[in-house]
Amino acid sequence: MNFSWMAWTMPTAIFFVSIFALIAAMGVWEYLRPGGDPRIGVLRFETTRGDRLFISLLGSAFINLAWLGLVDANLWWSLALSGVYAVLVFRYV
Amino acid sequence: MDKTWNNKAWFLVLPVLLLVGFSAVIPLMTVVNYSVQDTFGNNVFFWAGLSWFEQVLNSSRFHDALVRNLVFSLTILAIEIPLGIFIALNMPRKGWGVPVCLVLMALPLLIPWNVVGTIWQVFGRVDIGLLGRTLAAMGIDYNYATNPVAAWVTVVVMDVWHWTSLVVLLCYAGLVSIPDAYYQAAKIDGASRWSVFRYIQLPKMHRVLLIAVLLRFMDSFMIYTEPFVVTGGGPGSTTTFLSIDLVKMAIGQFDLGPAAAMSIIYFLIILLLSWIFYTVMTNYDARR
């Protein structure tokens, strides 16, 4: 099967493998500790682990876009900032 | 009673996952791949990094289309929601008027988008259209092909004509589900018309109204066909909304890289807004 029309590159492949690995890891986490760990955090509404992953990924996308549009510095910094943001989301949201 | 956990049921979701995979995930992956490359055709691609994203994020063309789209969505919501509630409140609840009104309300929803655009394009023409000729005879300077205000008015009125019915039908469904006992109690208490609306009808319509706002906002934010048929995004670029701009860039100019980057930014904005609406809706219900 020829996938050349999808125009794969190594960085985008790594990006998607990371996303799928995160989702798979969430599946394993759910298998080990079922129930989704629902709780009410700083946003004052109930979130599960899946919600927190979604908020982390969506927020990270906007952090990187804002960095790209507003800050003239290396994008690795915004990736690190996204990591910190994700940790905070999983800890407090 | 303990909840039964049976993960075998997840296999029943597999067909949907396959369908979503082929119709959404694989195309989205391809768009992401395109967004970091440049091409001149023949499946030959050149690495461009994140330059297309930087270009789109700093382009006034994208900013203008985004602002236009937000203004359009907020304008049609400000008109369609109150108008839809008003019409639903005044529709008959019994008798032969009910099916007549329901069919009349459903008619605009059954017309395809491009046909709606064609209807309004002809309707508004100054030379042959009923609306255009009437306004011209009244001395009003109306020409959607040359006047930006006229173009905006036409596009907004067209959307209101097409989609207010949806709000009406949703509100009407909410209203007819209110038991008569509520109205009888209000009558005994001597409640005013406004109090009945504020404390009985509006709370009962709240859920359907949130759905109506979500549907209308998302749909208007992605609007393409109707304004494209009527104005083609003009005059100039005054009615060029995000989707029209995107198609111009991708198909008109064959700038697949910048168009893919713009698609992803557009998708993320819609995803964020949908999530906010969904969260507000579900949490409001949970609190009630």
Image (cartoon, helix red, strand yellow):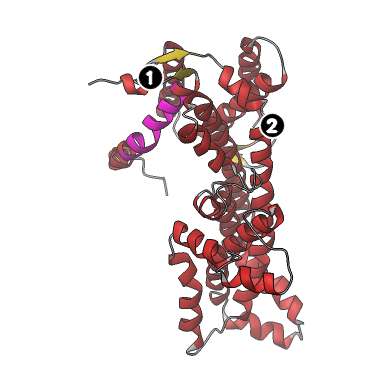
Contact between marks 1 and 2 (CB within 8 A): the answer is no
The structure residue drawn at horizontal position 45% and vertical position 35%, both measured from the top left corner, is B251
Estimate the x, y position of residue B164 in percent, counting from the top left.
58, 66
Q: Residue furthest left?
A: A1
Name the image quarter holding residue B61: top right
Circle 1 — which element?
loop
| On-image quarter of the N terminus of chain A | top left
**Disc 1: which residue:** A7
Magenta-highlighted stretch: main secondary structure? Answer: helix
**Numbered mark located on residue B60 in the image:** 2
| Picture quarter with the C terminus of chain A | top right
Amino acid on which the number 1 mark rests in the picture = Ala
> Is B91 placed above or below A65 here?
below
**In front here: B149 or B28?**
B149
The magenta region covers B19-33
Q: Amino acid at mark 2?
A: Ser
To the question of a shared chain for discs 1 and 2, the answer is: no
